[in-house]
Image (cartoon, rainbow, N blue to C red):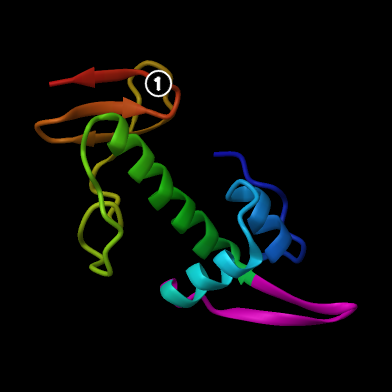
């Protein structure tokens, strides 16, 4: 997962987060930040810029990636508020045996990596 360099060390701006999540709107980012309870800080200047912690963005990006990979295996994953359930847990995260990239292995479904290598059970 390739992410841009933060504006301020440890903090991403809203415009950077828009690029990370494929040009979603600022309102959608605010909605995610409120739902996920991300701490933020404001930069005052020309307009107000909100900054969000890098750890929160990376964690949410991994959750979205887990959901996408699970869908390709035919597993429907819902984003619930329960921290111990898939996709919020890293229990199913593995490295692909072929390319060493990020992969998800779901029991009774199989394994798939971000580069498309899969093993279906």
**42 part of magenta stretch:** yes
Between residue 8 and residue 60, name the one nearer to us: 60
Q: Residue at 23% x, 18% y: name it.
A: 119
The residue positioned 42% from the left and 25% from the top of the image is 100
Residue 17 pos. (x, y %): 64, 57
Point out residue 15 in the picture as x, y percentages from the top left corner: 72, 60
Residue at the location (30% across, 50% down)?
90
Give percent across and percent down for residue 98.
37, 16
Q: Main secondary structure of the magenta part?
A: strand
Q: Is residue 48 magenta?
A: yes
Q: Quadrant of residue 74?
A: top left
Magenta segment range? 36-51
**Callout 1: helix, strand or loop?**
loop
Q: In the displayed structure, does residue 46 sit left or right of residue 63?
A: right
Q: Check the picture and name the quadrant holding the C terminus.
A: top left
Q: Residue at x 48, y 77 (%)?
A: 34
> Is residue 79 or residue 27 the one in the foreground?
27
Query: At which x and y percent is residue 102?
Result: 41, 34
17 left or right, relative to 83: right
77 over 8 or under it: above or below: above
Q: Quadrant of the N terminus?
A: top right
Find disc 1 in the rendering and name its residue. Answer: 116
Q: How many marks?
A: 1
Task: Work out whether residue 3 or residue 109 is closer to the camera in this orientation and state it.
Answer: 109
Whether residue 9 is situated above or below residue 95 in the rendered picture: below
């Amino acid at each position: 997962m390739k992410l841009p360099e933060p504006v301020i060390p440890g903090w991403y701006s809203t415009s950077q987060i828009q690029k990370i999540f494929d040009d979603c709107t600022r309102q959608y980012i605010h909605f995610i930040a409120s739902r996920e309870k991300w701490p933020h800080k404001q930069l005052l200047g020309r307009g107000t810029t909100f900054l969000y912690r890098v750890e929160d963005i990376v964690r949410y990006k991994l959750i979205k990636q887990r959901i996408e990979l699970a869908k390709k295996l035919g597993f429907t994953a819902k984003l619930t508020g329960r921290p111990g359930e898939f996709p919020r847990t890293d229990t199913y995260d593995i490295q692909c045996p072929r390319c060493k990239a990020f992969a998800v292995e779901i029991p009774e479904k199989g394994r798939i990596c971000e580069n498309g290598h899969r093993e279906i059970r």
